[in-house]
Image: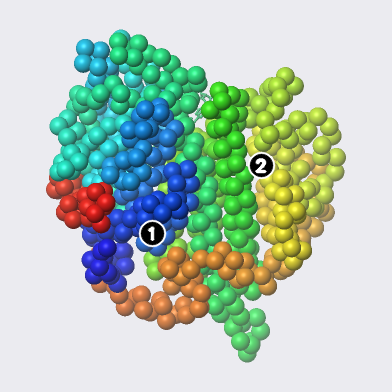
């Protein structure tokens, strides 16, 4: 095991250089993931449920700004599980599971992220040698972003346009070795490095990858869904989008990640708001807790309710994901479009709402929320990235809209899948005959809005589910959270409700009163509700949100650790007058100190012993 001394003990990551941050991340990651390997050996985690364990580690204080090994678990292994046939799984999964190989997932290119049918990397089959030739025809064809690829991974899943017998069959996945397992040097025909400093996740070691007519065996094409036979014959998949399966899985998992990040941020902000006293309600009185201000409650309480709403939604989505995947295994593809639309919608909505809520939590803490030591800026950096990766939010919402429009157009000719069944009810009868300022009334209002503008929004199953399984006291508080969440969004989306429902001005006024009553009712339970997230100080890593409330002493202790560093402002690679965006992105990437050396010392000292099970 590593001695405490070898880890940058006591110096917060913010004060490490870019290179030191990577080296620190490797040390922390091999220690953390050795724990996962120990749990595997003891049968405490399996290939089917490792995500909980890994997800907890990736969101923990040990790997607080991500890990160079994250993609190995987040996408490399799921891609093998989802896209490789049985023979390939037997070959690759054991080595991936015990980390004797470290993988990444290389789909996005400098020139394309959203439009994956436009990816430029080619994989051309050579029947004479039974090999695929991987090539990056242009600079924009270089893979750009894959986590861990910069200096860490020695294998990766590469998504490329498949050519055989002179015909293009679209994008397919391949497992490709990019570095020598002994020396970790890039293999001949491979151009590889890291892309440089980012807004956040600076420990992830995102990389770039270019191929120069690089040959791999035919059997390195992942062939669960489509195949290329030895003579070059292409056998197509039952459904063209089964190759997109890894993305659907990760979008589902991201919803769980948002629950963790939002719970942390609102715990920090709510506890700080109970400690912070500012201004007097009456002259001469003691300054009051800022948590007593309705404006502060308006900022924070909806985030507490959202964390619970997202947790319930994430669990429901996970059940749906497993149901649909069991059906896919039996050849029933009927619910795949619904799963895709659901995963797109909930990944986009939960990441966007969580980013907005985390920023609101930061703002609710005044200047102290702007301190890195509060952990709120770091959390914002992690969450806002999720609005972009695994499918940029705008584009994913368009995918959901496309599915809902199609569903609506087939309302009378096709049986509806469970999550959109409400569209038939909402369309069939005078669904919203009058407005009622109840949770059910608001949900029906949104269903009418959704029906009319084909936007899906409902979580009423969870309300019924909740009334069966909790004590009367807890039910009352949870109903207050549901009420708060509904009335908050009814007031936020008032224009839609006024346009599409018979809500009256008088009812809007009583809705506002009801909202403020709910804030007041929740106030006594606010700190208890965030304590219920049961997040230890080590997880929060926040001077503001510690359980003991010693905010000011901790702020001072952290401030005393600061060596003074000023990083020069960087010019923008994207906004240069000459438009040489891609060349500048690559030029800037090559300035990274990590790219100055072919192999970072941490490979031989830490990563290789870890991969050989010797750590
Ligand atoms: C935007 C996408 C989905 C468009 O894909 P495209 O092939 O162009 O499909 P169409 O828009 O033409 O729709 C055709 C048809 O296919 C259905 N469909 C699309 N995607 C899926 C899917 N995943 N599963 C099932 N079905 C799907 C669609 O509904 C249509 O059905 P119809 O019945 O209406 O015909 C695509 O380009 C896309 O997904 N773009 C986003 C790329 C992305 O997510 N990249 C992630 C890279 S990995 C990463 O970011 C890692 C991050 C690190 C980390 O997670 O930590
Ligand atoms: C932190 C981080 C980690 C990542 N890790 C990985 C990884 O490990 N592996 C990997 O392969 N990729 C990874 N990515 C890349 C990520 O998947 C892409 O950034 C994402 O898919 C968006 O593609 P893009 O960056 O090309 O943006 P673009 O698709 O160019 O989007 C730019 C803008 O154009 C808009 N736009 C694009 N298409 C449309 C449309 N059809 N309609 C309307 N508007 C549109 C978008 O909404 C957006 O506002 C990572 C990204 C980040 C930020």
Q: Quadrant of the N terminus?
A: bottom left
Q: Which residue lies under the disc numbered 1?
A: 64
Camera-side residue of 597 and 361: 597
Residue 34 picture quarter? bottom left
Check disc 1 and report its element: helix, strand or loop.
loop
Query: Mark 2, mark 1: which one is toward the viewer?
Result: 1
Residue sitting at the far bottom: 284
**Spot occupied by residue 66 in the image (x, y as percentages of width and height):** 36, 53
**Residue 553 to residue 606: above or below:** below
**Spot occupied by residue 491 in the image (x, y as percentages of width and height):** 70, 52
**In the displayed structure image, the side of residue 494 where residue 271 appears, left or right:** left
Picture residue at 74% right of the left edge, 63% below the top: 471
Picture residue at 49% right of the left edge, 57% below the top: 261
- Marks 2 and 1 sit apart, C-alpha to C-alpha, by 32 Å
**Spot occupied by residue 415 in the image (x, y as percentages of width and height):** 71, 24
Q: Which residue lies under the disc numbered 2?
A: 457
Q: Quadrant of the C terminus?
A: bottom left
Camera-side residue of 474 and 348: 474
Q: Residues within 10 Å of mark 2 (few under 14, many from 20)?
A: some
**Residue 216 to residue 307: above or below:** above
Picture residue at 67% right of the left edge, 30% below the top: 417
**In the displayed structure image, the side of residue 275 where residue 455 appears, left or right:** right
**Spot occupied by residue 99 in the image (x, y as percentages of width and height):** 31, 46
**Residue 569 to residue 498: above or below:** below
């Amino acid at each position: 095991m590593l001695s405490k001394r070898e880890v940058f003990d006591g110096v917060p990551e913010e004060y490490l250089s870019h290179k030191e941050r990577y080296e620190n991340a490797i040390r922390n990651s091999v220690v953390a993931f050795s724990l996962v390997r120990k749990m595997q050996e003891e049968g405490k985690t399996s290939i089917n449920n490792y995500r909980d364990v890994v997800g907890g580690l990736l969101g923990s204080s040990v790997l607080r700004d991500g890990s160079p090994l994250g993609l190995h678990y987040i996408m490399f292994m799921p891609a093998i599980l989802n896209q490789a046939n049985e023979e390939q799984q037997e070959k690759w999964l054991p080595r991936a599971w015990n980390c004797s190989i470290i993988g990444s997932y290389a789909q996005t290119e400098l020139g394309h992220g959203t439009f994956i049918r436009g990816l430029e990397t080619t994989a051309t089959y050579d029947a004479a040698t039974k090999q695929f030739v991987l090539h990056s025809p242009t600079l924009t064809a270089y893979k750009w972003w894959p986590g861990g690829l910069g200096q860490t991974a020695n294998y990766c899943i590469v998504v490329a346009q498949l050519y055989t017998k002179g015909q293009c069959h679209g994008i397919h996945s391949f497992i490709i070795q990019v570095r020598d397992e002994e020396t970790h040097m890039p293999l001949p025909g491979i151009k590889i490095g890291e892309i440089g400093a980012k807004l956040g996740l600076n420990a992830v070691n995102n990389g770039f990858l270019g191929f120069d007519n690089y040959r791999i065996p035919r059997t390195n094409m992942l062939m669960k869904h489509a195949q290329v036979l030895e003579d070059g014959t292409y056998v197509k998949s039952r459904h063209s989008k089964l190759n997109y399966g890894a993305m659907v899985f990760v979008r589902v998992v991201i919803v769980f990640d948002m629950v963790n990040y939002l719970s942390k941020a609102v715990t920090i902000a709510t506890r700080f708001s109970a400690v912070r006293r500012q201004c007097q309600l009456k002259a001469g009185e003691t300054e009051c807790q800022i948590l007593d201000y309705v404006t502060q409650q308006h900022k924070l309480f909806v985030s507490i309710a959202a964390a619970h709403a997202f947790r319930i939604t994430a669990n429901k989505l996970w059940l749906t994901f497993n149901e649909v995947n069991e059906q896919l295994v039996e050849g029933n593809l009927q619910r795949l479009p619904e799963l895709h639309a659901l995963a797109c919608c909930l990944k986009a909505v939960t990441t966007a709402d969580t980013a907005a809520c985390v920023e609101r939590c930061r703002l609710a803490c005044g200047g102290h929320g702007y301190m890195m030591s509060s952990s709120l800026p770091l959390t914002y950096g992690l969450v806002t990235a999720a609005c972009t990766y695994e499918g940029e939010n705008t584009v994913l919402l368009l995918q959901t809209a496309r599915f809902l429009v199609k569903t609506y157009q087939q309302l009378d000719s096709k049986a509806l899948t469970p999550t959109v069944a409400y569209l038939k009810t909402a369309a069939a009868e005078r669904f919203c005959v009058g407005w009622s300022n109840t949770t059910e009334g608001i949900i029906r209002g949104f269903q009418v809005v959704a029906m009319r503008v084909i936007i899906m929004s409902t979580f009423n199953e969870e309300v019924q589910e909740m009334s069966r399984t909790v004590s009367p006291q807890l039910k009352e508080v949870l109903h207050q959270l549901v009420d708060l969440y509904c009335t908050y969004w009814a007031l936020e989306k008032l224009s839609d409700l006024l346009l599409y429902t018979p809500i009256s001005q008088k009812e809007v006024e009583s809705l506002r009163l009801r909202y403020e009553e709910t804030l007041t009712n929740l106030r006594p339970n606010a700190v208890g509700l965030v304590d219920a997230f049961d997040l230890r100080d080590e997880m929060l890593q926040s001077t503001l949100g510690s359980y003991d409330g010693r905010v000011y002493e901790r702020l001072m202790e952290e401030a005393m650790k600061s060596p003074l560093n000023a990083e020069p402002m960087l010019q923008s690679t994207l906004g240069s007058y000459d438009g040489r965006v891609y060349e500048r992105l690559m030029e800037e990437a090559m300035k990274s100190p990590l790219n100055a050396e072919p192999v970072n010392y941490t490979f031989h000292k830490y990563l290789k012993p870890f991969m050989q099970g010797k750590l």
